[in-house]
Image: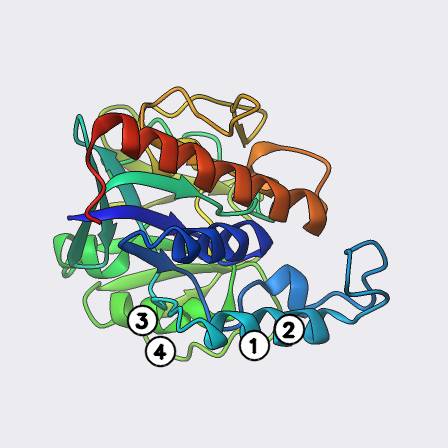
Amino acid sequence: MYDLLIIGSGPAGVSAALSAKARNLDFLWFGSRSLSGKIEKAERIMNYPGLPAVSGGEMRDAFLRQIDGLGISVLEERVNAVYDMGGYYTALVNEKMYEGRAVILATGVSGSREIPGESRLLGRGVSYCATCDGALYRGKRIAVVCTDPSLEEEVVFLAELAAEVLLFAGYKGCGVRRENVRRMEGYPTEILGEDRVAGVVCGGETAAVDGVFCLRSCVAPAALLPGLAAEGGHIQVDRQQRTNLPGCFAAGDCTGRPYQYVKAAGEGNVALHSAWDYLKAAGSTSK
């Protein structure tokens, strides 16, 4: 049982991790050594204090030097779901589970839109985790929506189990080549089904499928943590970055505009201090 789970490695997650280290908390930080795809692609950043007119790569390198200098490690695994267990939280990471007394969500925002029917049928044929649920569709026909080339390995994993995969790749240059994988044009406009997934609609055509896997680098907040209050695709927080769930805090782009690095870093720091106060009040820090 960790004191804290931090999910996301953009500026908000970096800020929260630095402050968690300063507070000597026992924490796990999920993300990537590249920190943030948004930062990597930034041509020039003009308004970040202390780093004037830097490129995204230069900002990433500066963050990494500070993280490495303090001996902070990033667990490079994607969190598929978080569950409120009543007094603590469990993060589902592929076939593993990690527990923390508090959680900070710094997940950013997804560049791809949610598909109508996706949330309604989540857990009833819609899944975000190939390794968790892939075996349920052995020998069946499935649709896979993949929005990030880094997730192609999961598409291949599913193709090894399913009889047929209808692949909707939301980017150019998809490298998946399997006999049972059929590349589809466009993006699904609806997931059909009442109690279970029955099909997907794309380009006015309906294809019958047994399940739909939505593989995205960032899961929508409300889908990531059941019961989390969200509006307009953003997590609802107060000035202390508290969500509607006790012990759950959020920071960065996932809490709403403006989508600014400096705003995200500030919120990450506030979220950590609020988590610290929560843990102290509960008398549950491990240190």
Q: Are marks 4 and 1 in contact (CB under 8 Å)?
A: no
Q: Are marks 3 and 4 in contact (CB under 8 Å)?
A: yes
Local crowd size for mark 1, using a 10 Å CA cut-off: few (<14), some (14–19), many (≥20)? few
Query: Which element type, helix, strand or loop, lies under badge 3?
Result: loop
Mark 3 lies on residue:
180
Indicate the position of residue 123 as horizontal and vertical percent values: 23, 36
Q: Is residue 209 above or below residue 123?
A: below
**CA separation, marks 2 and 4?**
41 Å
Label 2 or label 3, whichever comes before in sequence order = 2
User: The residue under label 4 is which amino acid type?
Assistant: Arg
Q: Nearer the viewer, residue 258 or 23?
A: 23
Instruction: Inspect this view and state whether residue 223 appears.
Output: no
Label 4 or label 1, whichever comes before in sequence order = 1
Q: Nearer the viewer, residue 43 or 241?
A: 241
Q: Nearer the viewer, residue 90 or 140?
A: 90
User: The residue under label 3 is which amino acid type?
Assistant: Asn
x 45%, y 71%: residue:
70
Local crowd size for mark 4, using a 10 Å CA cut-off: few (<14), some (14–19), many (≥20)? few
Mark 4 lies on residue:
178
User: The residue under label 1 is which amino acid type?
Assistant: Arg
Mark 1 lies on residue:
65
Res. 262 mark: none
- What is the quadrant of residue 73 in the picture? bottom left
Q: Nearer the viewer, mark 2 or mark 3?
A: 2
Res. 62 mark: 2
**CA separation, marks 2 and 3?**
44 Å
**CA separation, marks 1 and 2?**
5 Å
Left or right of 19 on screen, residue 208: left
Left or right of 262 on screen, residue 217: left
Left or right of 135 on screen, residue 158: right
Query: Which element type, helix, strand or loop, lies under badge 4?
Result: loop
Q: How many marks?
A: 4
